Image (cartoon, grey):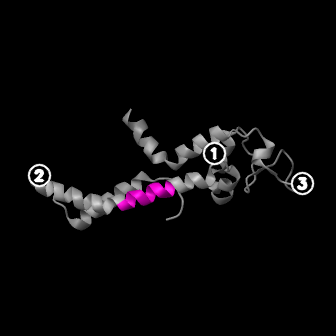
Amino acid sequence: MKNEPLDWMEIEQKIGEIMAKEKFPYCNVSVKARQEIMYVLLKKLVPFIKQHIKSACEFYSRYKDNPELLIKEHIEFKTAIEKLFNIEGKLRNDGTITRDIPEEFDYPKIPLSKSIYYDYKKYNKWLFKLAFKSVFEEEENEE
């Protein structure tokens, strides 16, 4: 599994797949039978959950303090990072900032961290919430 944010929906789907494959009865079973069902389910599910959590942790660790690398490898987050630092429309696809210089000029590219006030704390907090987004969404929906 590659480094990616945690997707709780995948975990929920896996629970459904295991339940369907094992053909667990949903009602009219004894307490002991329910315990056995839970044991089988957890035995199959725990490694899957660990793998997803590990992937999310590795995603966070890889891009912590490094928005340029995140943009280079995941261009889909470019707009969110521009909004985070209030520099909309100024980032290149390699994570460098344009500084309002037209692309056709051959100026050296300046990394984001050297061209604007770069708030590591703000970026890392945003990145953590991105990596574990589905967990935070669950909490927000419960409140």
Mark 1 neighbour density, 10 Å: few (under 14) some (14–19) many (20 or more):
some
- The reply to whether callout 2 and callout 1 are in contact (CB within 8 Å) is no
Task: Report the residue marked by disc 1.
Answer: 80
Mark 3 neighbour density, 10 Å: few (under 14) some (14–19) many (20 or more):
few
For the point 69% across and 44% down, the residue is: 82
For the point 80% across and 45% down, the residue is: 114
- The reply to whether callout 3 and callout 2 are in contact (CB within 8 Å) is no
What kind of residue is marked 2? Val
Mark 2 neighbour density, 10 Å: few (under 14) some (14–19) many (20 or more):
few
- Residue 143 numbered tag: none
Q: Nearer the viewer, mark 3 or mark 2?
A: 2
Residue 26 visible in image: no
For the point 88% across and 57% down, the residue is: 104
Task: Report the residue marked by disc 3.
Answer: 107
Q: Nearer the viewer, mark 2 or mark 1?
A: 2
> Depth check: 113 or 89 in front?
113
Residue at far bottom of view: 21
What kind of residue is marked 1? Ala
Q: Dividing the picture into quarters, in which one does residue 35 lie? A: bottom left
Q: Gap between marks 3 and 2, in whole Å?
A: 71 Å
- Mark 2 or mark 3, which is nearer the start of the sequence? 2
Vertical comparison of 62 with 81: above or below: below
Q: Is 45 displayed left or right of 129 in the figure?
A: left
Residue 18 within the magenta-colored segment of the rendering: no
Task: Report the residue marked by disc 2.
Answer: 31
SS type, badge 1: helix
Q: Gap between marks 2 and 1, in whole Å?
A: 49 Å
- Mark 1 or mark 2, which is nearer the start of the sequence? 2
Most common secondary structure along the magenta stretch: helix
SS type, badge 2: helix
Q: Which residues are magenta?
A: 47-56
Residue 94 visible in image: yes
